């Protein structure tokens, strides 16, 4: 079931209807104003009420997995804990393709002082660089020129001591808060017998290994193939254009294999997964692929339509057919 509406209102309606879920796996707003999107700076991920509603919907012992950004993770996680969850761990998805959102201080100082350095070369712009001067700006001052169908920028010498200084590091990971609603029974074993929740599915999440027939014990990091030594951890690259889909305009789509790994880890057989921030439907697609029931909520009508298309096209037998 997918719902086009405000997650606060819709989760309360589900609670009033007596709905219960076995796991919450979600990618909420990171509250960093990503690409100027208003929905990414409302503060909803910092609100105790948001996570308390998810808490109410979860069965005792049910797990919550919530993505965030490295610099806002703490505020979201405190809200999750204040809502009643036990913070069990922090997982990390590591990747090498993040883009540094750093200001070139040397260039900006020259602009402030009115300095114009001499031209020392030119740089051919590719992809996003051609539209806004992204890329390797940490050393030089650029002025764009057009030569035929190719765009270039002059590289000018920086005329002050702040050449090479910036304001931010390149992002290379996204943290995931791992929370659990307290169990209602005296032991996890008794809770599992009563509610089927409280534990995580270790064997279904093991990492293939030639050295270990059973597979390596799952860790709290996942990666996109930065180095071969990472082979002992779950591998998943960022989402491809093909996987994203031609009509998917959502800016923060998560890869299917990553979401399936997370859903499989915390959802018991026959369970229901909730995603209050459905985005473009990646969690719902993962749940459907794995044979779980799914409840997704998305406020944006535009993104909700994308969810419908993507989830409708998902083949629940895909894992067995591949």
Image (cartoon, rainbow, N blue to C red):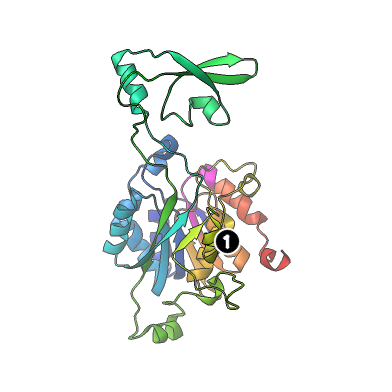
Residue situated in front as seen by the camera: 114 or 12: 114
Question: Residue 6 lies in magenta, yes or no?
Answer: no
Residue 117 in the image: state x and y as whole percent.
39, 14
User: Considering the numbered disc 1 on the image, is that residue within a helix, a strand or a loop?
Assistant: helix
Q: Residue at x 44, y 28 (%)?
A: 137
Residue 192 in the image: state x and y as whole percent.
44, 82
Quadrant for the C terminus in the image: bottom right
Quadrant for the N terminus in the image: bottom right
Question: Residue 302 lies in magenta, yes or no?
Answer: yes
Residue 154 in the image: state x and y as whole percent.
50, 17
Q: Residue at x 47, y 80 (%)?
A: 196
Residue situated in front as seen by the camera: 259 or 121: 121
Compared with residue 187, is residue 36 higher up or lower down, i.e. above or below? above
Residue 136 in the image: state x and y as whole percent.
47, 31
Name the residue that disc number 1 marks: 286
Q: In this picture, which residue range is highlighted in magenta?
A: 296-303
């Amino acid at each position: 079931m997918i719902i086009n509406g405000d997650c606060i209102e819709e989760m309360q309606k589900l609670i009033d209807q007596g709905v219960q879920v076995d796991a919450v796996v979600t990618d909420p707003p990171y509250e960093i104003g990503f690409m100027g999107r208003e929905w990414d700076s409302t503060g909803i991920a910092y609100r105790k009420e948001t996570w308390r509603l998810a808490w109410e919907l979860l069965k005792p012992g049910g797990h919550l997995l919530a993505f965030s950004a490295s610099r806002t993770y703490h505020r979201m996680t405190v809200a999750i804990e204040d809502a009643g969850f036990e913070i069990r761990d922090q997982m990390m998805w590591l990747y090498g393709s993040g883009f540094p959102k750093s200001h070139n201080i040397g260039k900006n100082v020259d602009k402030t002082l009115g300095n114009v350095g001499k031209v020392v070369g030119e740089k051919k712009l590719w992809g996003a660089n051609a539209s806004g001067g992204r890329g390797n700006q940490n050393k030089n001052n650029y002025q764009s020129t057009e030569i035929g169908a190719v765009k270039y920028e002059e590289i000018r010498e920086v005329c002050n001591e702040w050449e090479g200084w910036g304001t931010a590091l390149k992002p290379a990971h996204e943290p995931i808060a791992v929370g659990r609603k307290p169990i209602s029974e005296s032991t996890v074993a008794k809770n599992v017998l009563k509610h089927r929740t409280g534990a995580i599915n270790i064997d279904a999440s093991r990492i293939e290994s030639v050295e270990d027939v059973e597979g390596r014990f799952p860790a709290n990091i996942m990666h996109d193939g930065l180095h071969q030594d990472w082979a002992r951890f779950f591998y998943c690259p960022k989402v491809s254009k093909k996987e994203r889909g031609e009509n998917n305009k959502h800016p923060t789509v998560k890869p299917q294999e990553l979401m399936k790994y997370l859903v499989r880890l915390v959802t018991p057989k026959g369970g229901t997964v909730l995603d209050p921030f459905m985005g473009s439907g990646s969690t719902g697609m993962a749940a459907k692929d794995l044979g779980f029931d799914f409840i997704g909520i998305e406020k944006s009508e535009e993104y909700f339509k994308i969810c419908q298309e993507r989830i409708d096209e998902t083949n629940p037998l895909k894992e067995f057919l591949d």
